[in-house]
Amino acid sequence: MKMDFLNIWKILLERLFIRFFFLEFFFFLNEFEQTHSNEPYKQKSIEDIGKKVDTLNEERSEKLNRVKIVEKEKDGLESKRAEAIDYLKKENYLVLERAKLFQVAVHESKIGATETEENLVFFFFFFFFFFCLNNH
């Protein structure tokens, strides 16, 4: 019996909530209509709307002409852009080749440095050995 009674109350509360929601929504719509009425929009005549359409079409055509002019200029600069890209690719290639040459030079100098270090070690060893023999 309790389950039936609770279910009935649940259904009643849901229906009350739905009714309350729709009443609130209805009052909101009425208040919105009063504060934001459509009268200014209704009062505009077809001629006014036609004038607005004409001015907007003129603005559109001006902007479209600007776009066409810019596209022509862009197309005219396309060859210079290609030349600049080609130049940058060649410069990049030269920089990479110079870097390779630099790396080879660094590697060769390291080899030379190790030979110089070996010669210095030999010199100091010889000098130390000679110095020690002369002092004894």
Image (tube, rainbow, N blue to C red):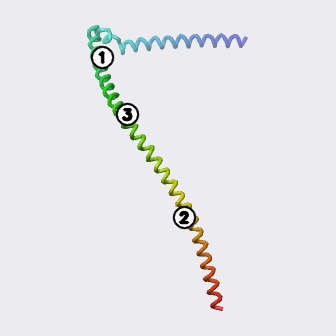
Q: Position of 60 compared to 86: left or right? A: left
Label 1: how many Cα within 10 Å (few below 14, some 14–19, many 20+): few
What is the x, y in percent for residue 66? 30, 26
Report the Cα–Cα distance between label 2 and label 1: 74 Å
Name the residue tied to disc 2.
109
Q: CA distance from mark 3 to mark 2?
A: 46 Å
Residue 63, by quadrant, is: top left
Q: Residues within 10 Å of mark 3 (few under 14, many from 20)?
A: few
Q: Are marks 3 and 1 in contact (CB under 8 Å)?
A: no
Point out the image quarter for the C terminus. Answer: bottom right
* Residue at image coords 39%, 39%: 83
Residue at coordinates 53% horizontally, 61% vertically from top-left? 106
What separation in Å lies between label 3 and label 1 (alpha carbons)? 31 Å
39 or 9: nearer the eye? 39
Q: Nearer the viewer, mark 3 or mark 1?
A: 3
Determine the secondary structure under disc 1: helix
Which numbered disc flags the more N-terminal residue, 3 or 2? 3
Q: Residue at x 54, y 58 (%)?
A: 104
Amino acid at pointer 2: Ser
Q: Which quadrant of the structure image shows residue 125?
A: bottom right
Placement of the N terminus among the 4 image quadrants: top right
Picture coordinates of residue 14, whole percent (x, y): 59, 13
Q: Estimate the x, y position of residue 49 in percent, counting from the top left.
A: 29, 11
Are discs 2 and 1 less than 8 Å apart at CB?
Answer: no
Q: SS for tag 3?
A: helix
Of badges 2 and 1, nearer the viewer stands 2
Where is mark 1, residue-wise? 57
> Is 27 displayed left or right of 121 in the figure?
left
* Residue type (three-letter) at the residue carrying disc 3: Glu
Given residues 11 and 58, the one toward you in this image is: 58
Mark linked to residue 78:
3
Q: Amino acid at mark 1?
A: Asn
